[in-house]
Amino acid sequence: MQSFSRKCIVAVAAILIFHRAGAGETNSPLTLWYKQPATKWTEALPIGNGRLGAMIFGGSRQEHLQLNESTLWAGGPYDPNNPKALAALPKARQLVFAGQYDAAAKLISSNMMAVPVREMPYQTLGDLYLDFGTNAPAQDYRRDLDLATAVAGVSYTANGVHFKREIFSSTADQVIVIRLTADQPGQITFTTGLSTPHRATVSVADADTLVLSGTNGDARGIKGALKFQARVKVLATGGNVSATNDNICVTHADSVVVLIAAATSYKNYHDVSGHPDAITEKQIAAASVRPYETLLSAHTADYQKLFNRVQLTLDTDEPLDLPTDLRIANFLNGNDPQLATLYFQFARYLLISSSLPGGQPATLQGLWNDSLTPPWDSKYTININTEMNYWPADTANLGECVEPLTDLVLDLAKTGERTAKIHYGAHGWVAHHNTDLWRATAPVDGPNSGMWPMGGAWLCQNLWEHYLFTTDQAYLKRIYPAMKGAAQFFLDTLVEEPTHHWLVTCPSLSPENRNPASTNTAITAGPSMDLEILRDLFSNCIQASEILGTDKKFAAKLAATRERLAPLQVGHVGQLQEWLSDLDMQAHDLHHRHVSHLYALYPSDEIDVRTTPELAAAAKKSLEIRGDQATGWATAWRINLWARLHDGDHAFSIFDFLLSPARTFPDMFDAHPPFQIDGNFGGAAGMVEMLLQSQGDEIQLLPALPAAWPKGSVRGLRARGDFEVDITWQDGKLTSATIRSYGGNPCHLRYGNALLSIQTHKNQEILWDGQSEKVIEKDTPLPFRP
Ligand code: FUC
């Protein structure tokens, strides 16, 4: 919690040191801005259209855009399943149940891991440079990213000329657009070129077009099978455009538009027969006949359809008039609630920019990666990170962004069938703790992280949640076969543990925490998280089968098996047990970043302060033992967990740390460190959990409002049951709430101890101030929702 004196110090400092921006320069609450170009990648600003992304450095002597295309990964279609795995499985189980965990890990390591043992990395495409050939000093320099329009900007004055750049990545036109202007004619002169670390060539096609053609990387013995191409066209007004071998030179133009297209030959995880040359040619041809204003307005309209659904105000709408990097540096010293709102909307911006229907899901770095060998390959780590990326998708009203994740899971349900069969001799499908563009599903990296068969099952929980928010039965029908296949795998592979005869997973692990009963391995049987995920998967499948009127017998089998799963247990210090035995206090690392067993509290709702108070108390004890500060994503998870415990001040104190320079880079990217985007998404999800929760059958208004945010309003959050919610509060108390019912479902609203139950109908709006006697119901035609 912020103390009063801390707040005062910062307020006074802000008044003394920094003048307010003058008219026309006012910084909107939705702008990230800086007084200097980026010198490091984590200072550069991201743009993206879900597929085509760039990091913008914004120099006045040289502009640099580091480019990404979401299907440019190393390797090609491959089968990592290990035919030796199945024969080793009975022995591995025997060793685990005999307590010989290290021996089991050794056996797993040599027989049950994928071949190759690591997956394919997501890779950078390359770099575009605009060299302005001047050393003139830049005055009044400013670089920004406007989240309201998804346009990045650079402006400065040099030699008395005011220059401006606007840059965006368009969904409508599938190109990146750079527009350069000056306040005097004939002032724009630069040379542009492309480079890449891949096997590639750069050539000039026509005097105004650069073409980079290449092949993706080989990795871990898998040959690069993708072709890719980037195509850059320069459209100048006035002046002259000419080409050298691999550069384009613009001299004395009045204004210039640069269009960048990029594509690979990836069609899907088993087909790489696409034609990137034809695709980029077509995209550039189409975009180059559209005026800049048309490109801009089509882009903004597309983006705003999603972005404008949610507005959040904490305290006031007026941000501190300080560059964003300085606000981050100061965040721990005082109260800057508008930086929190910027952080929240930046996460929504990042999700829209990195995950749109028809594309790939957000990786560990979303869409943005400048390396051929990024940290953890910038792939999909599905023992927490990918799931976390999608935590704010529905709550923050970006349901469409779940679509690429849905497609990924439907793919895994196919590739994972082979892994289920080859590694376990089982029906259904399984995915372990990572996957990549090629939808690999076998255990990777090593036994201590990879031997975890729950990745697919957890992803199914994300999809089920999306159903709960939308109540869209057509969607449920689409995902049900994947849910069923995931459950089928466990019906075939669960085994009875020898002590209580409960059904458990084996071999498995509690993500990536060492088993205290072993010398140095994570391998175990029946870690709590596995059973929690399974209770959800089975219950969700049973409900889905009822809703869809199918699979009665299968559902009955799941119900019977669910009863035999190892239960949640409370250990000797009152903690929720992470393992089958009460070993938490002997952990190799008491403060481990993963809090896997607390999945039951969040994102699941198996543990709930109201309905299971004893288990909630145990989860709280576990959280206290683990401590508040961890890596970026692990810090973000803790915020959500404390919010679910209805302790807003504790959640906020952790959020404070997340938004400090220790966990947030100057461009607001989350610092694991290094950069990993899950913390951005998890942090935003945690903010929603403080303001609105809807697990179980109640919509809870302001369940964990921190004292640091006494006044504010939020418009357009989503609640399970197909509702949209607006909340206004003052002095830490609800003043009004509006609930829009899109699905016509029953609505149980809670504010503190006040409860209101209404059977809503479609398109109805309910106004409530938290006192049950004051309800206004209006029938209004609600805005169209896709
Ligand atoms: C899991 C985490 C690490 C990291 C990696 C990508 O393995 O334990 O902290 O986030 O994923």
Image (tube, rainbow, N blue to C red):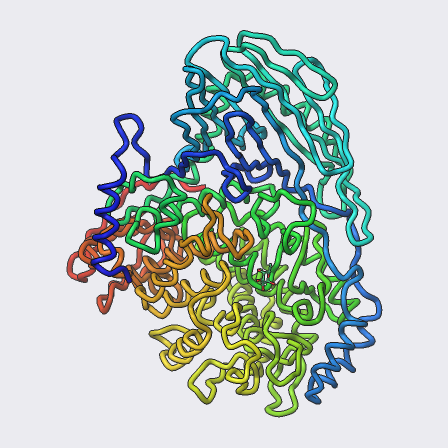
Can residue 748 be seen by looking at this rendering? Answer: no
Image quadrant holding the N terminus, namely bottom left
Residue 42 picture location, percent across and down: 52, 44
Q: Quadrant of ligand 1?
A: bottom right
Quick one: 502 or 324, which is closer to the camera? 324
Quick one: 194 or 619, which is closer to the camera? 194
Q: Residue at x 31, y 40 (%)?
A: 781
Image quadrant holding the C terminus, namely top left
Can residue 566 be seen by looking at this rendering? Answer: yes
227 to 571, vertically: above or below:
above
Residue 256 appears left or right of 711: right
268 to 543, vertically: above or below:
above
Residue 720 picture location, percent across and down: 40, 58
Instruction: Name which quarter of the figure residue 134 lies in.
Output: top right
Residue 280 picture location, percent across and down: 67, 27
Quick one: 17 or 294, which is closer to the camera? 17
Instruction: Name which quarter of the figure residue 644 lies in.
Output: bottom left
Residue 363 picture location, percent across and down: 59, 50
